[in-house]
Image (spheres, helix red, strand yellow):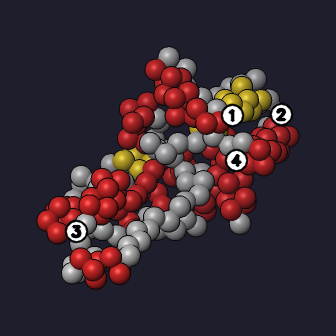
Amino acid sequence: MKKFFMVVMIMGLLLLVVGCGKKGDVLRLATWDSEESLKTLKAIAEKFEETHPDVKVQIEAYGDGFDKKLSASFGAKNPPDVMYMWDFPKYQASLEPLNTYIDNDDSFKIYHDDLFPGLLNYTTIGNDILGMPAGFTSHVMYYNKALFDQAGVDYPTDDWTWSELREKSKKKYPNWVMILMALLYQPNQTPMTSSNFSG
């Protein structure tokens, strides 16, 4: 299912970009994939080229240096046409919103309607959809109840905000919790739920 999801997303984005281009275009696709995932992506590109013979997909596998290379390409005003991305706020001024394309293409509507609610929150800033999710990772926080019991402190609850968690950690939690808070803290003061990881 994950592979199918990726195929649909990549082919959809390639179609979107082709709609903006002209005959003989080369579409640059930047990825952090390697090994098996890169083979899958190349197969997707080849399948796309079969159905769009006037378009060549050039895969740029940035690997471990993905973030630096992507940032450099934007800085040089020569970014790829389609790319994997996780830091939408950093690049939002340079990304074209996909809303109009989604609204005008039935295949995107089907894909869009099939997404889990909230997945597009991560790729949306304001009302602009800046990307299509290729997958997602669940975020979870674990804590050791025995250590909390030893310290005589209450367990975290679902209704805590990030701000509350941070403040309570400063006051009474062991030092190891402060390290965790430094890694998890988000300044937006939103409730501590799975949905607030999406933007």
Q: Are marks 1 and 4 in contact (CB under 8 Å)?
A: no
The mark found on residue 119 in the picture is none
Q: Which residue is mark 3?
A: 173
Pick the residue in front: 197 or 55. Answer: 197
Please tell me which residue is depicted at 38% across the width and 73% down the height of the picture. Answer: 143
Classify mark 3: residues with Cα within 10 Å, few (<14), some (14-19) or many (20+).
Answer: some
Q: Residue 69: percent from the left, percent from the top?
A: 56, 27
Classify mark 1: residues with Cα within 10 Å, few (<14), some (14-19) or many (20+).
Answer: some
Q: Nearer the viewer, mark 4 or mark 2?
A: 4
The mark found on residue 11 in the picture is 4
**What secondary structure is found at the residue carrying circle 1?**
strand
Label count reads: 4
Please tell me which residue is depicted at 79% across the width and 41% down the height of the picture. Answer: 42
**Residue 62 is drawn in which quadrant?**
top right
Q: Are marks 3 and 4 in contact (CB under 8 Å)?
A: no
Q: Which residue is mark 2?
A: 53
Q: Nearer the viewer, mark 1 or mark 3?
A: 3
If you read the primary sequence from the N terminus, does the residue marked by circle 3 or circle 2 appear first? 2
Residue 48 visible in the picture: no
Q: In which quadrant will I find the N terminus? A: bottom right
Three-letter code for the amino acid on which mark 1 is drawn: Ala
Q: Nearer the viewer, mark 3 or mark 2?
A: 3
Q: Nearer the viewer, mark 1 or mark 4?
A: 1
User: Looking at the image, is 125 positioned above or below residue 29?
Assistant: below
Three-letter code for the amino acid on which mark 2 is drawn: Pro
Left or right? Give the position of 48 relative to 21: right
If you read the primary sequence from the N terminus, does the residue marked by circle 1 or circle 2 appear first? 2
Task: Residue lying at the far left in this picture: please name it.
Answer: 171
Q: Which residue is mark 1?
A: 61
Whole-Å distance between the Cαs marked 1 and 4? Answer: 17 Å
Left or right? Give the position of 59 relative to 69: right
